[in-house]
Structure formats: C-alpha cells, structure tokens
Image (tube, helix red, strand yellow):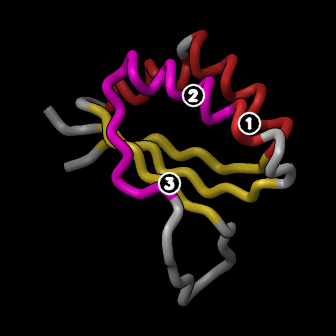
C-alpha cells in the first residue's frame, strides 16, 4: 500500500503563538503514527515563490494521512496554527 504524505509550506506570523500549535499537533501525529522527514532546514527555491518553512510528514497510507488531517485532534491544533501562521497543506499519495 502506498504511503501518504503531508507537504506543508508555512510562514509563521507570531513566533510566540506557534509553540502551542506544535504541542497540540503532536497529539494527532502520535495517534496516526506520523514521521517527520523534513521539519525546517535549509532550502533553495530555484523556481517560483516559496514560504520560509517547509515540512514533510510520512504516514503509513494516504487514507491515514487524510484521517489525521480531518481528525478532531488535528483540527483543534489547526485552529491554533491559523492564529500564528499562514500555510498550505498538501496531502499526497506516494508511489
């Protein structure tokens, strides 16, 4: 079964309000066995616009990646994220 991935591009607007999101999202990510492959770090954007922070999260399946995003646990965390940051979240099936 193909794995599922979140690819997230983030601009943090309020660095003091962001840590509560990180604490809250851990609950959902632990529940859905998420594994961070990329969390920040150096990058280059040779084409197109880019946000300053990038995250890639791996799940055991695409369905599990979707379930995590739509879970009550993650949606509670997402409300906190929206207070502190702007983001694009893509959920993608791997090969």
Q: Is 36 covered by the magenta stretch?
A: yes
Question: How far is mark 1 from mark 2, CA to CA?
Answer: 9 Å
| Label of residue 25 in the image | 2
Magenta residues? 21-39
Q: Quadrant of the N terminus?
A: top left
Q: How many marks?
A: 3
Whether residue 54 can be seen here: yes
* Residue plotted at (51% across, 27% down): 26
Residue holding disc 1: 81
Residue holding disc 3: 55
Task: Describe the element under mark 1 as helix, strand or loop.
Answer: helix
Task: Left or right? Give the position of 41 relative to 86.
Answer: left
Residue furthest bottom as drawn: 46
**Observer-nearest of 10 and 62:** 10
Whether residue 92 can be seen here: no
* Residue plotted at (58% across, 21% down): 74
Q: Is 85 covered by the magenta stretch?
A: no
Residue 5, image quadrant: top left
């Amino acid at each position: 079964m193909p794995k599922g991935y979140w690819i997230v591009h983030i601009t943090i607007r309020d660095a003091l309000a962001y840590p509560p999101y990180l604490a809250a999202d851990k609950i959902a990510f632990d529940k859905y066995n998420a594994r961070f492959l990329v969390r920040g770090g150096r990058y280059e954007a040779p084409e197109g616009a880019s946000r300053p922070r990038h995250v890639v999260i791996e799940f055991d399946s695409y369905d599990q990646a979707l379930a995590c995003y739509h879970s009550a646990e993650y949606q509670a965390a997402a409300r906190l994220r929206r207070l502190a940051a702007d983001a694009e979240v893509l959920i993608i099936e791997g090969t």
